[in-house]
Amino acid sequence: MDFRTTIPIRPLARKLDHSQTIFLIGSCFTENIAKRLSAAKFRVTASPTGILFNPESIADAIGRCALRNYPTREELQYGNERWFSYDFHSSFSNADADTALAAMREGIDEGFAALNSADTFIITFGTAIAYRHTKSERVVANCHKQSQAMFRREMLSVEDIVVRYSALLDSVLRNKQVIFTVSPIRHLGEGLEQNSLSKATLRVAIGEIMRHHDNASYFPSFEIMNDDLRDYRFYAEDMVHPSALAIDYIWKCFSEAAFLPATQSLIERIEAISKAMAHRPFNPQSEAYRRFCQQQLEEIEKIRLTCPKADFRKEDEFFAQYL
């Protein structure tokens, strides 16, 4: 008997390979997939303005990057002895205003370059619940631990999300493959009922977006976590984030949907080199380990013939030191 629900995952219309560049933006679940793609030597840009949770702020970030709209000194806010922007994650804040601005501008430059070069976008919605700054009447990406009296909590509507992303898909994302996903991370601070309503809102909005745009697709990370794995042992200790095992499984599902067998085989060879780097020899000065390192360098050269743009500088330097 089968005691789990296996979710059939629709393959991507355009498979990913190492000739492409990939832009990822959205909630912290984006970071997990970006790390896997980067480790597999894909050219990746992830979260140029930091982790974002609600669709409105994600769209604002894409718009900022597309227009190369740098934040100004006048836009910065000051609180808790740090300068910050409501449009950027707290990792960009700094005790020095110029340092904070420089980091934000660098993020915008990175996003602008990626928007123009990326073939595929992966957009992860975390929650439909947003916080609107009452003075400016703008949805903020991050409240930066400011007084809650400064914000108005609201649930974004399906219609608002669809309208905003339809505009993006008809303009800056028009010729891109856009993969939407809903983060499986639970926003328990809002309560389970509100979290459920939020995730449902996001899923319905994505369905509507896909109905009108052929270049939009959906990867069911939320459904894999909740309906396939469906057990607290697949959550981290906080009972909110997926465990390492769950992330491994979701990555496996994504790989099967996104990559051709040849690309999957290449990724396995790259992973083998990473494992070889992590291996700690009994005697690093031995002839046997020298031959082992030489074999790894030869394998890297073979992989370069298949994907010449893959960056193996770190691996080259590591293995060459033992020759």
Image: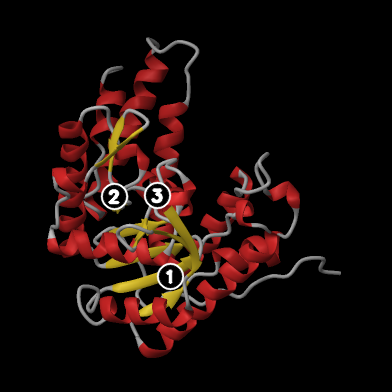
Q: Distance between the residues labelled 3 and 2?
A: 11 Å
The percent position of residue 83, horizontal first and vertical second, equals 27, 35
Q: Pointer 2: what residue?
A: 49
Q: Would you call the spot at circle 1 few (<14 residues within 10 Å), some (14-19), or many (20 or more)?
A: many
The percent position of residue 81, horizontal first and vertical second, equals 32, 28
Give whichever of discs 2 and 1 has the lower sequence position: 2
Q: Can residue 186 be seen in this view?
A: no
Q: Is residue 75 visible?
A: yes
Q: Would you call the spot at circle 3 few (<14 residues within 10 Å), some (14-19), or many (20 or more)?
A: many
Give whichever of discs 1 and 3 has the lower sequence position: 3
The percent position of residue 118, horizontal first and vertical second, equals 23, 63
Query: Does 310 sit left or right of 254 as displayed?
Result: left
The residue shown at (57%, 68%) is 199
Which of labels 1 and 3 is toward the front?
3
Quadrant into which the N terminus falls: bottom right
The residue shown at (61%, 49%) is 242
Q: What residue type is labelled 3?
A: Asn
Count of all numbered marks drawn on residues in the image: 3
Quadrant housing residue 18 = bottom left
The residue shown at (27%, 50%) is 48
Most foreground residue, 204 or 44 = 204
Most foreground residue, 315 or 198 = 198
Q: What residue type is labelled 1?
A: Phe
Which mark is on residue 142? 3
Q: Pointer 1: what residue?
A: 180
Give whichever of discs 3 and 2 has the lower sequence position: 2
The reply to whether dot 3 and dot 2 touch (C-beta < 8 Å) is: no
Which of labels 3 and 2 is toward the front?
3
Query: Does 53 sit left or right of 307 as displayed?
Result: right
Q: Which amino acid does label 2 sit on?
A: Thr
Most foreground residue, 321 or 11 = 11
